[in-house]
Amino acid sequence: MAAGGTLSFSVASMVEDVLQQHGTRVGDLNLESRKAEEAASRRNEAAGWLRKMIGVVVAKDLPAEPSEEEFRLGLRSGIILCNAINKVQPGAVPKVVESPCDSALIPDGAALSAFQYFENVRNFLVAIQEMGLPTFEASDLEQGGKSARVVNTVLALKSYSDWKQTGGNGIWKFGGNIKPTTSAKSFVRKNSEPFTNSLSRTSSMNEKPLSAQASDLDSNKMSSSRSFSMLVRALLLDKKPEEVPVVVESVLSKLVEDLSNVLPANMNCKKPSMKFASGDKMLEDKNSFNKSYISEEESKGRLLKQQMIFDRQQRDVQELKQTLHTTKSGIQFMKMKFHEEFNNIGLHIHSLAHAASGYHRVLEENRKLYNQVQDLKGSIRVYCRVRPFLSGLSNYMSTVDHIEDGNITINIPSRHGKGRRSFNFNKVFGPAATQADVFSDMHPLIRSVLDGYNVCIFAYGQTGSGKTYTMTGPRELTEKSQGVNYRALGDLFLIADQRKDTFNYDVSVQMIEIYNEQVRDLLTGLSVPDANLIRVSSTSDVIDLMNLGQRNRVVGATALNDRSSRSHSCLTVHVQGRDLTSGAILRGCDVIASLAQKNSHVPYRNSKLTQLLQDSLGGQAKTLMFVHISPEPDAVGETISTLKFAERVATVELGAARVNKDSTDVKALKEQIAGLKAALAGKRRKMNTINAQPLAAR
Ligand SMILES: Nc1ncnc2c1ncn2[C@@H]1O[C@H](COP(=O)(O)OP(=O)(O)OP(=O)(O)O)[C@@H](O)[C@H]1O
């Protein structure tokens, strides 16, 4: 390291200080001239050796005995120094940059390429350093620089050259022109090989400092020790003997002080800063190496990272492929299952269709059988109802003697002979019979209307016998006291609603009055041959229309009783049902009529009433006739004639068969119906079970 020279200057200045303290003038000692003389001697030795090594031609810029300035200028380009070191150690500076104008003297500050100058001097200093010789600083070749250090380096190189020429045996000791007896330390070159890479340079640099520093110290010590002794002698020359110890003590204490200031700074500097351009270059190299090393590491890292990303993406792709495969398999499986399900559903629908058609066949069969039973019961059924005594008249003896099943026995006053007479009907309802009792026998026929049969329900009887009561109910109507028309219509709409999945029903009504052989439309109030049909959708719709008809019936009546006895009102309910499966149309009607007891002068067969009811009464329809009688004995004559007419209607006039309840035909039919009902119930259960199952399980 270039810390050398520090001691020599310090000692000289220190002695100077001491001399000044003691009032001694240096000028008197002629110290400067002695120093200059010695420096010139060393410079000449160095210049001479350089000229000898590289030849006078190459060293033309360096005079044999140059001044300090000439020495500095001659070596400033570094060309002479590089050539000299290459002579001592070939290849030490691999490339020497020659001046473009060799022959020209390069003046101070002349334009030799700064790069060339820098390169040569730097390379020379690196080589010197590699060889373990004392170095100088590049700035020492500049004006004001310490050329003595340059001289020192050249003389060290000379000494090394001499040692090498003698065979290089033994330990080379750098002595310069200093006598071997001085305290110069042995100098062992640590790394003589030229560096080949920045790493070896760095390591040699790191190993170098202490030895180089020691070397610098030694050489400076040697060179300055002679001056030091000369100075001390000159100092003590004119001193009296008693003054000598004081002066020596001062010199020594100053020396110790300076040493203590200088040594720690040099000796403790294990990692001194690089002052040379060569050091900078090495740092640059190291940095660039580090950079390239780092960038290589970085690129490796990046590659590794990319590889990892690539690997992960490949794994992802594999996973996706696997998922796709699984999904495809799943879809295939679903397709298969779907086809299976589809086929199963197809089979199931087929069996359901089969069952449904069977069900419909059974229904149809049931309907026919049901209505056959109704037929066997008789196309016309005649019922007799006895009104209770009205309040206030309960003390009278009743006309009715007794009632037993379908038989009613009437007490006949003695003046009319015989005393009693019995009449047979399908059923006789006594004064205690309720509205529900009366309707119960009518109920099965309502279903027949919805199956496409015509049903005629009419009330017959003298005035005040209770026709309106049976058909409609009392004035203060309650649910319990509702008449058969409410109940029948209620049933009709209820059954139609229950069948809505299989049948679509349209219901409409017409209401007429036959008065004095004139037909009047009670819903329009006009006399018309055919009454209007008005569509209805509920029982209340029908009731509203019946009320309207009732009001029209009353309007214009001159004598209510007279009118009542000659008027027949008739409500006809038309039902049209469409079988939703087969599309078949069923048509039925329910005629609800209130017929006054006919006058004897009107022939029954030709009457308007008979014409009106011919469809119902002619055998195509099921007819229910409710004969009403009053219990009061004063009307017994009319009662008997009413009963006679009713019996004739039931047996002779209309030719209807009387039902024998015990006939074998009825029994067989009943059994057949029971069997069919059981079969139907079985089919229904089966269908309900199938419908309850989830589709996949079917
Ligand atoms: N079964 C019965 N229970 C209680 N009261 C009844 C019964 N039958 C009829 N009545 C009552 O007897 C009276 C006459 O009955 P209703 O008006 O029904 O006779 P009708 O035959 O319709 O008469 P008309 O032919 O004059 O119209 C009414 O007050 C009615 O409430």
Image (spheres, grey):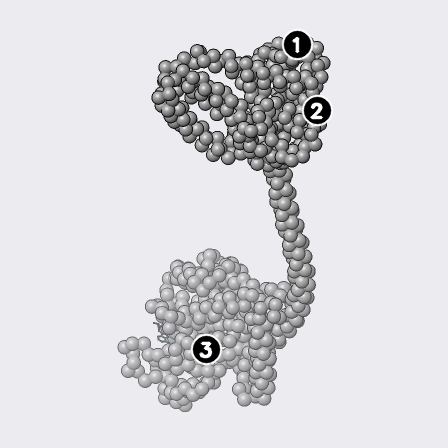
Q: Disc number at residue 105? A: 1
Q: Which residue type carries mark 2? A: Lys
- Closer to the chain start, of discs 2 and 1, is 2
> Are dots 2 and 3 in contact, CB under 8 Å?
no
Q: Which residue type carries mark 3? A: Ser
Position of 142 compared to 480: left or right? right
Name the residue tied to disc 3.
Answer: 440
x, y percent for residue 484: 44, 72
Name the residue tied to disc 2.
Answer: 87
- Residue nearest the observer in this picture, 324 or 560: 324
Label 2 SS = helix
x, y percent for residue 518: 49, 63
Q: Residues within 10 Å of mark 2 (few under 14, many from 20)?
A: some
Q: Marks 2 and 3, Cα distance to the nearest angstrom? A: 150 Å
Q: Residues within 10 Å of mark 1 (few under 14, many from 20)?
A: few
x, y percent for residue 568: 45, 68
Residue depicted at x 53% and y 60%: 530
- Closer to the chain start, of discs 2 and 3, is 2
Relative to 408, does residue 315 appear above or below in the rendering? Answer: above
Q: Disc number at residue 2? A: none
- Closer to the chain start, of discs 1 and 3, is 1
